[in-house]
Amino acid sequence: MRELRLKRVRLLRSSAAASALAGIALTALLGAALATFATEFLHSYGYGLFVGLPFCLGLLSALVYAHRDERSASSSVQVGMLSAALASLSLLLIGAEGLICIVMALPISLPLAALGGLAAYAIQRSRGARQRATAPALFSVAFLLPSLMGLEARLEPQPAVKPVTTSIVVNAPPEVVWRHVISFPELPPREGVFRAGIAYPIGATIDGRGVGAIRRCRFSTGDFVEPITVWDEPRLLRFSVTAQPPPMKELSPWGNVHAPHLDGFLRSREGQFRLVRLPGGRTRLQGATWYENRMWPAAYWRAWSDRLIHSIHLRVLRHVAALSEGDREQARQ
């Protein structure tokens, strides 16, 4: 009798594992296909991709997992999250996306997949509802969700242009700081945040003086072309952005992966340096960038892009400060 009970336990565990594997594998493949459809064909990085898809993957995988037997809430959540994680990994393995974008998306996709798993758990509490819900869930993911993605791509709103502002205090007067704002030599080695592939500034040059001069800020991925629109020496330098390089170089086992979000989804529109004279021959140096982000939900993706632009500002401002304070020390000697 004891051996018989052990065999039944092993069989049940094997059945649960097989059901979990089936749910995860099915939805992961479907999820990778739909993510590729949204990004490569629709060129859309919106709510359908980052909200609807992970929730539906969690829901469908957990429903497949519980199709025959009732499962626990925790195991349903785990299956849902694993399906979303495997779908993301599949995009990396087929070369559709790079590691950076996938890692940045996980904090929103995994909780939504877990929520989908919980929804499946609530449904599967009733045996009849559990079996009736799998087919509609599969239909929603395979047919309804792509239709909503297509509609979202057609009706995509114009993203807001918002600023990111960063300030530091430089131990040098504005007249000295100004010289290193308009152009500066090569920056020191990149900081840790930029070693993951995020584009970072290397140096800046300027052709001409005054309004109409062309400033070029050289990044690791190419040049920003910045025609000067305000030249108020030594107080304010403002410029528009007429050309810009990709915002990152994706990390991938396949080498150079150029995902659609690298073209125009994060676009700088305008920038400026403001210099404010402070007591004691010091300067408050403020850098600002006005940009738009065409990835949704806007609040989530702006939290990432604001932080990265702030890091870029700090790299430039600290370099300008070091050059300016070095000039001041030399003048004193």
Image: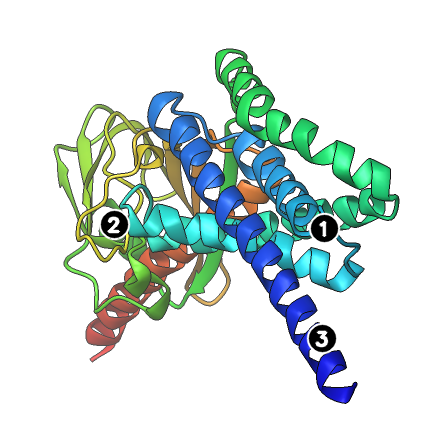
The answer to which of 104 and 230 lies nearer the viewer is 104
Question: Which of the 4 quarters of the picture holds residue 315?
Answer: bottom left
Q: Residue at x 41, y 64 (%)?
A: 281
Q: Are marks 3 and 1 in contact (CB under 8 Å)?
A: no
Res 231 seen here:
yes
The amino acid at mark 2 is Lys
302 lies left or right of 206: right
Marked residue nearer the N-terminal end (3 or 1): 3
| Nearer mark to the viewer, of 3 and 2 | 3
**In the drawing, what numbered circle is on residue 66?**
1
SS class of the residue under badge 2? loop
- How far from the left and from the top, in percent, is residue 133? 75, 33
Q: Quadrant of the N terminus?
A: bottom right
Q: Quadrant of the C terminus?
A: bottom left
SS class of the residue under badge 3? helix
Residue on which the image places disc 2: 249
Residue on which the image places disc 3: 9
The amino acid at mark 1 is Ala
The span from disc 3 to disc 1 (Cα, nearest Å) is 17 Å
- How far from the left and from the top, in percent, is residue 62? 67, 49
The answer to which of 76 and 201 lies nearer the viewer is 76
- How far from the left and from the top, in percent, is residue 225? 21, 32
